[in-house]
């Protein structure tokens, strides 16, 4: 493979970053917030996609890792005045250990499918009640961060700074996913997803690879949680650990396209604006309208787009290419069946 062809897939995320950087001057505050939410949710969905998409282990509790990232960063900042940069490292390390431990227990006991999903959502729900009863973490009220502007504190009075940081987050996520998708690690994950027994027969340590995927996914979502809390300057048990959060994270990856580089971003780009506009327009009249949209999107995706938007587009492209190839291979002057010669 030539050098130019090898680096071609990395050009797309960079172009996206340039285009997004041109948006702040032409967007109002409402749309800046919507796009920032797109960046956050897309990044979180990219992290879930490692375990749920590439590896095929559908977790329903990834809000746990987002919550660890957000809570530990906010806690060490509020209680000890620790810079969020160090809090972020602690939070990512804690998420890595949690992802490893859960993976080690669950995958050693060969829990798969619905059993794995139920365990993950149960752990996330346990976290809600545990954190709600810890006074040092603010209890059910959560933690409200103090204002302390400066790069050392990851806070700025200028909201545009967060917008550009969000662009860096999502572009970095796309580039890293693109790189990992060509590594042996991801090939092993896809082998596990397609046929775990066959992968083991070929010498793949499936338990080890699934645990690695769990750790990668956990750390990724923890970083998303850090960005979340530094922007909103608040974190509560239900705002990160709740089952709605976990479902949102996986939904964006499913709608966009599982085990694809761009799928999580595409899913978030489509669903987040729809749900946010619906919430702002109908929130007082029809509470829970956004949840209804998420549910409808999930059902429609399962029925008509099981491989997501990008998966559907790829299949339509292949169908068109095959049809075009068959037409080119047809003998000259051949008539369709039942047709008449002119």
Image (cartoon, rainbow, N blue to C red):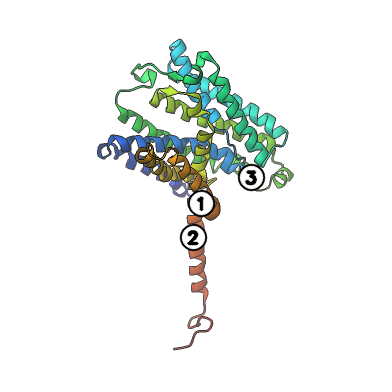
Provide the secondary structure element on which disc 3 rests: helix
Report how far apart the C-alphas of labels 2 and 1 lie in the structure. Answer: 18 Å
Q: What x and y, as percent, mark residue 220?
A: 51, 31
Q: Is residue 163 left or right of residue 304?
A: left
Residue designated by label 1: 300
Front residue of 280/6: it is 280
Residue designated by label 3: 193
In the rendered view of the protein, which quadrant contains the C terminus?
Answer: bottom left
Q: Residues within 10 Å of mark 3 (few under 14, many from 20)?
A: some
Looking at the image, how many numbered discs can be counted on the residues? 3
Q: Residues within 10 Å of mark 2 (few under 14, many from 20)?
A: few
Q: Are marks 1 and 3 in contact (CB under 8 Å)?
A: no
Q: Residues within 10 Å of mark 1 (few under 14, many from 20)?
A: few
Q: Which mark is residue 316?
A: 2
Report how far apart the C-alphas of labels 1 and 3 lie in the structure. Answer: 23 Å
Q: What x and y, as percent, mark residue 101?
A: 65, 26
Residue at 40% of width from left, 35% of height from top? 37
Residue 46 visible in rendering: no
If you read the primary sequence from the N terminus, does the residue marked by circle 2 or circle 3 appear first? 3
Residue at 33% of width from left, 42% of height from top? 19
Provide the secondary structure element on which disc 2 rests: helix
Residue at 68% of width from left, 32% of height from top? 106
């Amino acid at each position: 493979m030539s050098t130019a062809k090898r680096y071609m897939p990395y050009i797309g995320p960079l172009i996206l970053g340039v285009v997004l950087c041109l948006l702040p001057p032409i967007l109002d505050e409402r749309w800046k917030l919507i796009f920032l939410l797109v960046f956050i949710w897309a990044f979180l969905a990219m992290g879930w996609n490692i375990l749920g998409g590439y590896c095929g282990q559908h977790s329903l509790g990834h809000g746990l890792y987002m919550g660890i990232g957000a809570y530990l960063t906010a806690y060490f900042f509020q209680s000890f005045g620790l810079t969020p940069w160090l809090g972020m490292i602690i939070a990512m390390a804690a998420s890595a250990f949690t992802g490893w431990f859960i993976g080690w227990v669950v995958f050693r006991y060969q829990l798969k499918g619905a059993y794995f999903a139920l365990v993950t959502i149960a752990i996330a729900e346990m976290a809600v009640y545990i954190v709600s009863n810890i006074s040092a973490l603010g209890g059910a009220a959560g933690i409200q961060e103090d204002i302390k502007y400066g790069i050392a504190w990851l806070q700025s009075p200028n909201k545009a700074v967060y917008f550009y940081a969000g662009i860096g987050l999502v572009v970095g996520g796309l580039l890293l996913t693109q790189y990992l998708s060509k590594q042996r690690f991801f090939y092993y994950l896809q082998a596990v997803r397609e046929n775990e027994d066959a992968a083991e027969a070929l010498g793949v340590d499936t338990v080890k690879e699934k645990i690695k995927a769990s750790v990668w996914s956990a750390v990724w979502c923890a970083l998303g949680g850090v960005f979340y809390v530094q922007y909103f300057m608040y974190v509560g048990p239900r705002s990160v650990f709740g089952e709605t959060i976990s479902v949102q994270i996986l939904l964006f990856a499913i709608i966009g396209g599982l085990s694809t580089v761009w799928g999580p971003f595409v899913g978030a780009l489509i669903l987040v604006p729809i749900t946010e506009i619906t919430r702002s327009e109908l929130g007082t009249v029809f509470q829970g309208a956004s949840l209804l949209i998420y549910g409808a999107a999930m059902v429609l995706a399962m029925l008509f787009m099981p491989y997501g938007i990008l998966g559907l587009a790829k299949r339509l492209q292949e169908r068109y290419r095959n049809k075009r190839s068959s037409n080119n291979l047809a003998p000259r002057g051949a008539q369709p069946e039942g047709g008449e010669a002119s």
